[in-house]
Image (cartoon, helix red, strand yellow):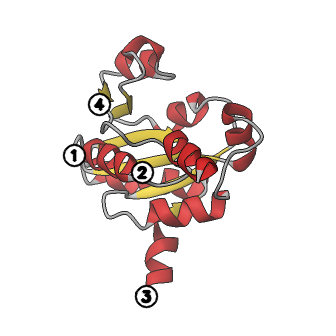
Amino acid sequence: MNHRQRLQHKIHNLDSLLELVKSWRSNNKKVVFTNGCFDLLHPGHVDYLNKAADLGDELIVALNTDVSVAKIKGIHRPIQDENARLMIIASLECVSAVFLFNEDTPIEVIREIKPDVLVKGADYTIGNIVGSDFILQRGGVVKTIDFLDGYSTSLIEKKIKNA
């Protein structure tokens, strides 16, 4: 398999992802789910995603579309388009699958995927994480992960603007 095929193997739509999750479950794999913009990949993202992957066997990343990033972050974002962000996230060894979602929150995809572990950054509290009540009611786990100090897309953006 060449590099392009390896990346494409990890990039899914919701239907193909649900089939993949079904095969993981038949092999008793623990599925971890997180979501975000992941605009300019930096060491904080890499650290976060690796720690999330450590919480199970397979890590799914739901990536906000360009339209949803602009709604969340403002019209100046994303800096990198969704196809670039998909390719970059798919290239990470710790990521098992990545897909785009356009909704305001990932609650519907969380309900469809039914991950064993739901993860967000420590800027959230467990009760504020979308889907946490659904996961906990199913007997799953909801975790927050501390950020790596000194790294954020906003800091990078500010540094570039001030250069």
Query: How far is disc 2 from disc 3 in space, using C-alphas?
Result: 24 Å
Residue labelled with disc 3: 2
Which residue is situated farthest in the bottom direction here?
2
Query: How far is disc 3 from disc 1 in space, using C-alphas?
Result: 26 Å
Query: How far is disc 2 from disc 1 in space, using C-alphas?
Result: 17 Å
Residue labelled with disc 2: 21
Residue 94 sits in which quadrant? Answer: bottom left
Residue labelled with disc 1: 54
Q: Quadrant of the C terminus?
A: bottom right
From the image, state whether disc 4 or disc 3 is nearer to you. 4
**Residue nearer the viewer, 17 or 67:** 67
From the image, state whether disc 4 or disc 2 is nearer to you. 4
* Secondary structure beneath label 4: loop
Label pair 3/1, CB-CB below 8 angstroms: no
* Secondary structure beneath label 1: loop
Q: Earlier in the sequence, mark 2 or mark 3?
A: 3
Q: Horizontally, is 39 left or right of 118 in the view?
A: right
Q: Amino acid at mark 3?
A: Asn
**Residue nearer the viewer, 25 or 7:** 7
Q: Earlier in the sequence, mark 3 or mark 1?
A: 3
Q: Residue at x 26, y 49 (%)?
A: 29
Query: How far is disc 1 from disc 4 in space, using C-alphas?
Result: 14 Å
From the image, state whether disc 1 or disc 4 is nearer to you. 4
Residue labelled with disc 4: 146
Within-10-Å neighbours for mark 4: few <14, some 14–19, many 20+: some
